Amino acid sequence: MYVSARADYGMCAVVELARAYAKTPTQLVTSEHIAQSQGIPAKFLEGILRELRQANIVMSKRGPEGGYRLASPPDSISVADVVRALDGPLAAVRGQRPEDVVHPDSSLVDVWIALRAAMRSVLEEITMDQVVSGQFSAAIADLINSPGARQRRTR
């Protein structure tokens, strides 16, 4: 899976808003604060926040007392929600959904579908409150701590 800069920065922004939500759910955070604290280019962040607002992941208020906050509690926002809002479907093959790809050997389509199912099983389960707390389910913790999980592979 390729994680785009847009999705990575979007996750950082949502994590920052989830931390603020944990302190005070209605607290607004400025885009300047998010950009500075997370090291995100301000102009790039504005576009990301706009897309997250259109996806109803964040809310915004204009004006001198304005800013951003989560539109719903962090335990109801998954990593998959953020990735889909910013990058579209979790798994695409040549820009198409796996089930729409035509191959002479249909078992290859099954491989792409299995890949999407595996990504969903991780990204849909992990919520923003889990990311903030670092407390993951046993299944996710097992994946994180599995032998070779942090090992780079060249082939």
Image: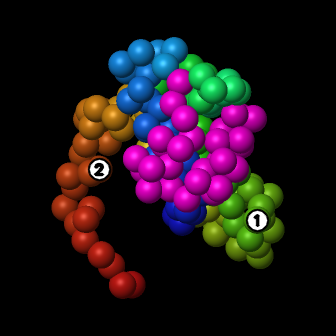
What residue sits right under mark 2 in the picture?
A: 143
In-front residue for pair 26/56 = 26
Image-quadrant location for residue 80: top right
Q: Residue at x 71, y 43 (%)?
A: 51
Q: Residue at x 60, y 22 (%)?
A: 65
Q: Quadrant of the C terminus?
A: bottom left
What residue sits right under mark 1 in the picture?
A: 95
**Element on which disc 2 rests:** helix
Magenta span: 28-56
In the displayed structure, 113 sits above or below 142; it is: below
Please state which amino acid type lies under the numbered disc 1: Gly
**Element on which disc 1 rests:** loop
Q: Local crowd at mark 2 within 10 Å, few (<14), some, or many (≥20)?
A: few
Please state which amino acid type lies under the numbered disc 2: Leu
Q: Position of residue 74 (x, y in %)?
A: 46, 25
Query: Left or right: 26 with respect to 152?
Result: right
Residue 84 in view in this figure: no
